[in-house]
Image: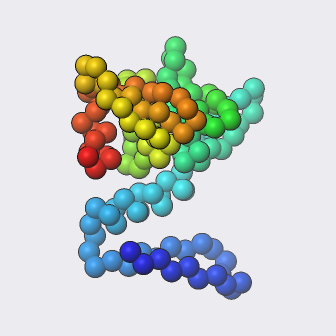
Amino acid sequence: MKITIIESDDIQELEVVLRCKEMNEEVIKILTSLRSFERKVMGFINGKTYLLLPDDIYYFESVDKKNFAYTKERVYEVSMRLYQVEEMFGDGHLFRATKSTIINLDKVRTITPRFGGKVEVMLENGENMIVSRQYVARLKEKLGF
């Protein structure tokens, strides 16, 4: 893959041009990653609204009918339900790990098999998360195992 960056004072808007011989899986992954930069998640803390980039979120969790987004420094309440997060960002690096969690695969540091077909992942922030056995095959597929 060849990457060319052109800087110029004449350029008013960021433009990405992707040239390829054919549309393949690698090109689709690149496009998906680029599109995720356009989408943001609204998070709430103490009545204030924050716009969060999906890449900054370690994971989403649903607890007692409330949904939360966990970043490096804070936990935000989000109005999106997990299925909505999946629909909006599931084509990228966000992955449904259990019925109540969605993990950002870019934040995974280690993966460890566990008893009963489950998998444990440790995130860059040191948190350990479980991937239910019903989602393990999809995890392996997303990671290219």
Picture coordinates of residue 3, whole percent (x, y):
47, 77
Picture coordinates of residue 141, whole percent (x, y):
26, 45
Residue drawn where x is 51% and y is 31% of the image? 60
Q: How is the image coloured?
A: rainbow
- Left or right of 31, for residue 69: right
Where 141 sits versus 4, above or below?
above
Q: Nearer the viewer, residue 121 or 52?
A: 121
Picture coordinates of residue 116, whole percent (x, y):
25, 19
Write down the quadrant of residue 67 in the picture.
top right
- Left or right of 5, for residue 82: left
Residue drawn where x is 24% and y is 36% of the image? 137
Q: Nearer the viewer, residue 55 or 109?
A: 109
Picture coordinates of residue 8, whole percent (x, y):
67, 84
**Taking the image as drawn, is residue 8 in sight?**
yes
Residue drawn where x is 49% and y is 53% of the image? 36
- Left or right of 144, for residue 34: right
